[in-house]
Amino acid sequence: MKSISIIIYVAVLLSRALVSANAAESDSDQESQTEKLAKETQNPIANLISVPFQNNFNFGIGPNDATQWILNVQPVIPITLNKDWNLITRTIVPIINQPSLASGIPSAFGLGDINPTVFLSPANSGKLIWGVGPTMTFPTATESLLGDGKWSAGPSVVVLTTPGHWVIGALANNQWSFAGWGNKSVDALLVQPFINYNFPDGWYVTTSPIITANWLAASNERWTLPLGGGVGKIVKLGKLPINLQLQAFDNVVTPNRSGADWQLRFQAQLLFPK
């Protein structure tokens, strides 16, 4: 009887150990899946449907030291063309609240110019992930102060790599106006480098400044160069994963007349993994 009791006791210990091991393995799998999802949100051409709501606060603009708020609604929809190629559509719909920037300049609120981009990207990339395609801007602004009044287009490219816990890359485009109204033309560059380091529990640190150049402006009014970064985390609202992110940037170079002193960016991104 004593030997049977010992055998039962050992069996109980083994079963508990197996349950603990399975639970730990399950937690580890969950963490790795969360980190994988975080890395996909940081890839502009991932095969992932998402809807970011990006709030941009630009502080210290113009003589009135005004604060501009821009909400960019940015649905990303990937389309599988075949086993080798994906088409990723990325559209930026800006909603802008712009107070008076200087004496004699009115305030404005409404829709800005819509900017769709389409990337053609290999479905099975190697270590280097890339996508190329056209970007366009439509003169959809509801107030003249909120847009350029021009139809613009140009090439866009994104390149990135995802070694280990890192996501490192850059997105760039240049647009030229070809139609519209008024005397204001467009020849504008946008470069967004991004560096992310991911932790297993969904937290990550990030920097993704948006560098711009207006090639038609004077050399001392041409560039906007922000420096900064922030943190993010994947959370769940019920079964819906959401990517929350907060970043702050100091504009070390900015146009004197219309540039902001610094920026705060808060984003809530709804994720719809397949």
Image (spheres, rainbow, N blue to C red):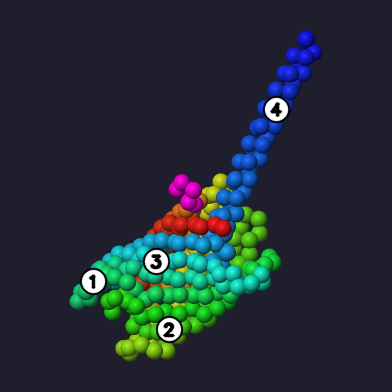
Location of residue 271 with respect to 90 vertically, above or below: above
- Point out which mark residue 152 bears: 2
Task: Look at discs 4 and 3 and give the one toward the viewer.
Answer: 4
Q: Label 4 amino acid?
A: Ser
Residue 128 x/y as whole percent: 66, 68
Tell me the SS state at disc 2. Answer: strand
Disc on the earlier residue, 4 or 3: 4
- Point out which mark residue 42 bears: none
Disc on the earlier residue, 1 or 3: 3
Residue count near mark 1 (Cα–Cα under 10 Å), binned few <14, some 14–19, many ≥20 = some
The residue located at (31%, 88%) in the rendering is: 182
The residue located at (39%, 75%) in the rendering is: 114
Q: Badge 3 is on which residue?
A: 72
- The residue lying toward the viewer, choosing from 261 and 273, is 273
Tell me the SS state at disc 3. Answer: strand
- Point out which mark residue 107 bears: 1
Q: Badge 4 is on which residue?
A: 15
Q: Is-magenta flag for residue 225?
A: no
Is 119 placed left or right of 176 in the picture? Answer: right
Write the start and end of the magenta stretch as one range. 236-241
